[in-house]
Amino acid sequence: MRVTEKGQVTIPRDIREFLGVMPKSEVEFKQDHGKVYIVKSNQPAKPINKFKELRGVATANMSTDEIMALTRES
């Protein structure tokens, strides 16, 4: 398995399925007597706040009433 320049590797599908690792899952690396283990974290994945990413993006210089009027036009 090759490590990318960013230090990333792909966890093989059978290992992901065995561990129950899904996208956005948290994993931990454990060291024990010169060996390294990957384990699924007991902590839940951090929730994604989709709205936080969009905060401050809208730059329209309109009032709330003007924006609401635009959304109601047919």
Image (spheres, rainbow, N blue to C red):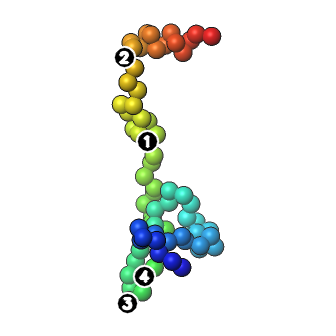
Q: How many marks?
A: 4
Q: Can you identify the residue that label 2 sits on?
A: 61
Label 1 – label 2 distance at C-alpha: 25 Å
Per the model, the C-alpha gap separating discs 1 and 3 is 39 Å
Q: Percent from the top left, x then y, of residue 12?
A: 59, 73
Judge by depth and name the residue closer to the eye, 57 or 55. 57
Which dot marks residue 36?
4
Q: Do the CB atoms of the residues marked 1 and 2 lie less than 8 Å apart? A: no
Q: Which residue is mark 1?
A: 49
Q: Earlier in the sequence, mark 1 or mark 4?
A: 4
State the residue in front, 30 or 43: 30
Which is nearer the N-term, disc 1 or disc 3? Answer: 3
Q: Is residue 13 visible?
A: yes
Query: Would residue 26 appear left or right of 56 to someone viewing this image?
Result: right
SS state under label 1: loop
Image position of 74 with respect to 10: above or below: above
Q: CA distance from mark 1 to mark 4?
A: 32 Å
Depth order, front residue of 66/47: 66
Circles 3 and 2: CB atoms closer than 8 Å: no
